[in-house]
Image (cartoon, rainbow, N blue to C red):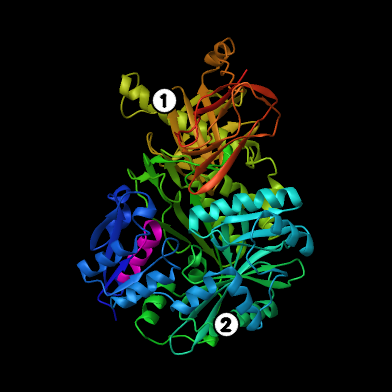
Amino acid sequence: MFNKILVANRGEIACRVFKTARRMGIQTVAVYSDADREALHVQSADEAVPIGPPPSAQSYLVMDNIIKACLDTGADAVHPGYGFLSENKAFAEALEQHGIDFIGPGTYAIEAMGDKITSKKLATDAGVNTIPGYTGVLADADQAVTVANEIGYPVMLKASAGGGGKGMRVAWNDAECRDGFERATNEARSSFGDERMFVEKFIEEPRHIEIQIIADAHGHVVYLGERECSLQRRHQKVIEEAPSPFLDTATRRAMGEQAVALAKAVQYKSAGTVEFIVDANRNFYFLEMNTRLQVEHPVTEMVTGTDLVELMIRVAAGEALPITQQDVTLTGWAIESRVYAEDPFRNFMPSIGRLVSYIPPTEGEHVRVDTGVFEGGEVSMYYDPMIAKLITHGATRDQAIEHMRAALDSYHIRGVTHNISFLAALMAHPRFVEGRLSTNMIAEEYPDGFHASDVPHEDPARIITVAASVHHRYRDRAARISGQMPGHERAVRNDWIVIMNGEAHTVIVREVENGHDIDYNGETFEVRSDWQFGEPLFKGTFNGSPICVQVEREKQAYRLFHGGAEVTLMAVTPRVAELLAYMPVKTPPDMSKFVLSPMPGLLVSVAVRVGQEVKSGEEIAVVEAMKMENTLRAERDGKVQTVHAYPGDTVAVDQPIVEFE
């Protein structure tokens, strides 16, 4: 077994590997860029070594610096995590030359499966179902259009070295094919340093279902069930679960056996994932093989009781697998939500900044949190904006969903915007609850983007009565501090007007043991909690059922967050409510004539000039963030008055780029 493992990665995956290695009695080494000097993974390791400036191309992707860190610390093995150098054949070869073990597959498997064109040919030879398409490298956009017409639209343009949704475009006609080829090629060049493109038939109403395999160097390969990864946005996975609500036993076995056959064909060892696209009739086709640990591996661990990281380490150390296919059972259901620093109400633009407040859900039998951040830490513009992976487990899928909804309610994040409202909306969406998924679901259900109105709103009684209980406690505290009430006394009853969305709701709050009985709209609601003013989470019960509401005091109002919905309310006396009706409403400034940057990033191009007439929908500029190109288009017809920023500029959120007359 290894004495010391270095993780050539950052964030939650590095923390995850360190946790397992520590349990196995193995010492750990972290590497970090200048931007990650205070990061959680650095604090979690026994040793830490700086490897360069913030850009990954100058730090986490510099093989020589990581190998030097191994030699300087005496690390005898490297776990690559995912992303960065995890599927880099040259990195694995360089480690081998220095006598350092690579905790991953052999170089042949990495090379063969890392190239989508080669992997598709090998899959066909191994008897794995493949998608119809053209496996040659496309020379240019003209050839892409020619081949697309031969295959028949719609088609998917893909970077041969692609992954994570980068370098991919769906085209439904010649114009989209040309534009998609150029965009995908640019992303591939930027992300992977490899601009080779190919094209294949796009499967409509598809599901993305993948098989987890684990193999050793002794010829043993086992598949550990499947993961449903169909809920995606821009080809990026959002929610994953195991098992799939769609597969039957026969299909699961057939997919698993084909995944094993492919692994054996490339002499695979370590953990790997064979991804399939599955149509409405359960026909499945090979998509790609990821020769590394997947982001969503925890759901497999939760339903199989395995530790994939530990198995990877043991296999790399030469041990045989401790399990056979007959040992694999799927118990219960697990769901993973990817919590990102991004604004779902602004087209999911990434958010950066300091985590002013960070309180993850309490971990236990049903809840797991894999994270690489902490309160006071920063989400950097240089890397993927993932905050954490939130995983829940239940005896049934419905139970796993309920645990996830409760965990999302208690996930308190401030300082950066986050996607918890979006995740909560998906958890409550009828299509998700019923398991009617496809990779197109998010685009179909939110064709114009995600908006506050898309968040499901419960009976307002829950929020109104909790707000009344919160305000009653606040007024008691304020009265005692001001001396208007003796310290041992509490107001037994109060009549309040709760104002929400401009509507006034009359409530009567009565003090009872450990909470309040609240009369509202002809009913009495029981709100019980030991919450104290200033605590961010109001935990208790509502009519006997558990409830967690996030609470913030903002001047004279309260901001409550529950079930993905964020609501601002005021609780006032009846007389104050009368007077508020006379208060003027401030009109926000008109920003419609500006094209603003929706995110921090690099301004790649500006397509207009001063004096140019522009039609609605025309391209104005392209901003790159997290290596993804985002095209900004005109929302109305107009004439360009001023260009405020130019290609090469670093732009901030809401920074004006172009102004119309």
Q: How many numbered marks have been drawn onto this rendered protein structure?
A: 2
- The residue to which callout 1 is attached is 475
Please say whether residue 328 is visible from this viewpoint.
Answer: no
Q: Which amino acid does label 2 sit on?
A: Val
Quarter of the image where one finds residue 347: top right
In the displayed structure, would residue 130 be above or below residue 429? below
Of 367 and 155, nearer the camera is: 155
Q: Does the magenta portion include 13?
A: yes
Classify mark 1: residues with Cα within 10 Å, few (<14), some (14-19) or many (20+). some
Q: Taking 438 as reference, is 507 left or right?
A: left
Q: Which of marks 1 and 2 is in front?
A: 2
In the displayed structure, would residue 363 be above or below residue 92? above
Please say whether residue 91 is visible from this viewpoint.
Answer: yes
Question: Looking at the picture, how far across and down is residue 410, in whole percent?
Answer: 47, 47
Q: Which amino acid does label 1 sit on?
A: Arg
Kindly report the secondary structure that dominates the magenta region of the rendered protein.
Answer: helix
Secondary-structure class at tag 2: helix
Q: Residue at x 70, y 55 (%)?
A: 142
Question: Looking at the picture, how far across and down is residue 594, in whole percent?
Answer: 58, 24
Quarter of the image where one finds residue 265: bottom right
Q: Taking 350 as reference, is 253 left or right?
A: right
Q: Residue at x 55, y 69 (%)?
A: 115
- The residue to which callout 2 is attached is 260
Residue 631, numbered circle: none
Question: Looking at the picture, how far across and down is residue 236, in whole percent?
Answer: 57, 55
Q: Residue at x 56, y 43 (%)?
A: 348
- Name the quarter where the C terminus is drawn: top right
Question: Looking at the picture, how far across and down is residue 500, in whole percent?
Answer: 59, 27
Mark 1 or mark 2, earlier in chain: 2
Where does the magenta region start and end? 8-21
Of 448 and 650, nearer the camera is: 650
